[in-house]
């Protein structure tokens, strides 16, 4: 039953994110997190929640979720990328560059990361 609820909540969050309804997406990602999914899915949900906060202009909340993602999956480039985007929003450019550099070190071929790392 929990797995069904998790899958439904994540899917609804993804649909809302696709429609750029970031508040609703964040709500559904929180619902999915409450189901205590695996470490991998938990990191993914924190990453998506961080993205919602970024789009809503909430840098500190974006950073908190991005850092939670990074603690769960420290070798995932996207976690560091999200941290960098949050630092950019907070106008902490040196910290953003460091996070982007860490992401790029983990995935040197990612074009988006190459562009983010001025």
Image: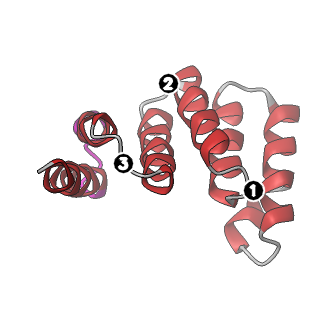
| 24 is higher (above) or lower (below) than 106 | above
Residue under the image location 87 percent in, 43 percent down: 98
| 113 is higher (above) or lower (below) than 23 | below
- Residue occupying the far left of the picture: 1
Give the CA separation, mark 1 to mark 2: 20 Å
Give the CA separation, mark 2 to mark 3: 25 Å
Residue assigned mark 2: 58
Q: What element does badge 2 sit on?
A: loop
**Dominant secondary structure (helix, strand or loop) of the stretch shown in magenta:** helix
Q: What element does badge 3 sit on?
A: loop
Q: Looking at the image, is mark 2 or mark 3 nearer the viewer?
A: 3
- Magenta stretch holds residue 66: no
Residue under the image location 47 percent in, 53 percent down: 44
Residue assigned mark 1: 116
Q: Earlier in the sequence, mark 1 or mark 3?
A: 3
Q: Looking at the image, is mark 1 or mark 3 nearer the viewer?
A: 3
Across and down, in percent, residue 6 comes to 22, 50
Across and down, in percent, residue 37 comes to 36, 48
- Point out the stretch of residues depicted in magenta: 18-25
- In this image, 44 relative to 81: left or right? left
Residue assigned mark 3: 37
């Amino acid at each position: 039953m929990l797995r069904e609820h998790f899958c439904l909540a994540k899917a609804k969050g993804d649909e809302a994110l696709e429609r750029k309804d970031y508040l609703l997406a964040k709500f559904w990602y929180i619902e999915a997190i409450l189901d205590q999914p695996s470490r991998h899915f938990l990191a993914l949900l924190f990453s998506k929640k961080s993205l919602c906060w970024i789009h809503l202009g909430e840098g500190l909340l974006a950073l908190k979720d991005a850092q939670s993602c990074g603690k769960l999956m420290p070798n995932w480039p996207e976690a560091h990328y999200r941290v960098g985007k949050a630092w950019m929003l907070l106008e902490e450019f040196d910290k953003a560059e460091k996070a982007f550099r860490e992401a790029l070190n983990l995935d040197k071929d990612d074009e988006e990361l190459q562009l983010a790392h001025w």
